Structure formats: C-alpha cells, structure tokens
Amino acid sequence: GLVPERPHAVVGVGLNVRQRAFPAELERERAVTSLWLLGCEIELEHALEVLLARLGERMDEACACPEASARAYARALDLVGRDVRVRLGQEERRGRLEELTLAGLVLGGERLALEHVQALELATEPAPSAR
C-alpha cells in the first residue's frame, strides 16, 4: 500500500443538516444540534459545497502552519484544563488535560503520543486525583 512520507491524519466530519430530534441517550452524552434546529434551512447540496470549500481552506492552513492549526483545534475542543478520559488501545486513562499539541497531550504530568490516542473525551465524573 501507499505509505505517507510525513505524519498524517484521517479527518472525519459529521454535519447534521435536517435532523429534527436526537435520541435521549445521545443528548445526555453531549450537546448535539442540527442546522435545521438552529433555524438554518439549507439544501443538503449547498451545505456540502460550503463544508468542502472550508475543509480545503483548513487543510491548506494545516499544511502551511500545523502548530497554529493544532492550537485552534485544542481551543475548539475546549478540553484543556478539564477532566478527560483518554483511550489508548485497551487501556483508558483519566485525569486533567494539561496540554494538547502536535507533540502529544499531557495528562497528569505524563506526555502521551497522539498516534497512540484513540479517543479523547470529557469525563462525566472527576478523575480520582481530583476528588
């Protein structure tokens, strides 16, 4: 297969365009909405066109200045300084997220390489050390 010459990432994007309701368990887990619920009635094709145009711009920015893109991503996540769960294979770690950069994330004073992180999410209860 094709092997990339430099570090790479896989981007997954989900955009709720016409969703009018969400399952209760999903709403309990995290904030969810759709363009329709926000009062934006847009055609699916137009939403896709706008999304793809912005994605292209963001990819160009990420290639030109990856550290700035990483900082913007960390700000958008709004998880730095909060208690999180990190899944690394079969292992899960919990603690306060101190830093998130291209070099990795720092959790409880320990740096974890991003390539090993499979999931990063807000913890629903404080980490044991924070109690």
Image: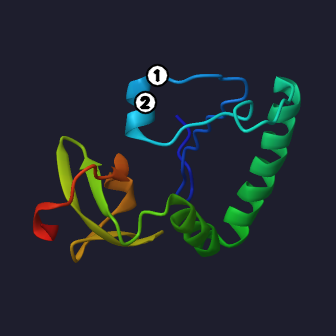
Location of residue 79 (image quadrant): bottom left
Location of residue 62 (image quadrant): bottom right
Colour scheme: rainbow
Residue flagged by tag 2: what amino acid is it?
A: Leu
Residue 97 vs residue 38, the one in the foreground? 38
Q: Where is residue 77 in the image (x, y as percent from the top left)?
A: 50, 59
Q: Measure how far apart labels 2 and 1 are at the Cα level.
A: 5 Å
Give the residue drawn at x 75%, y 48%. Answer: 55
Q: Does dot 2 land on a helix, a strand or a loop?
A: helix
Q: Is residue 129 left or right of residue 104?
A: left
Give the residue drawn at x 35%, y 46%. Answer: 118
Quarter of the image containing the C terminus? bottom left
Q: Is residue 6 left or right of residue 51?
A: left
Q: Does dot 1 land on a helix, a strand or a loop?
A: loop
* Label 1 Cα neighbours within 10 Å, binned few <14 / some 14-19 / many ≥20: few
Give the residue drawn at x 54%, y 50%. Answer: 9
Above or below: residue 89 compared with residue 7: above
In this figure, which residue is indicated by the disc labeled 2? 26
Q: In this view, does 30 lie to the left or right of 15?
A: left
In this figure, which residue is indicated by the disc labeled 1? 23
Question: Quick check: marks 2 and 1 in contact, CB under 8 Å?
Answer: yes
Residue 129 vs residue 117, the one in the foreground? 129
Above or below: residue 97 compared with residue 121: below
Circle count: 2
Residue 102 vs residue 48, the one in the foreground? 48
Give the residue drawn at x 48%, y 63%. Answer: 78
Above or below: residue 32 compared with residue 81: above
Q: Position of residue 34 (x, y in %)?
A: 66, 33
Above or below: residue 100 compared with residue 43: below
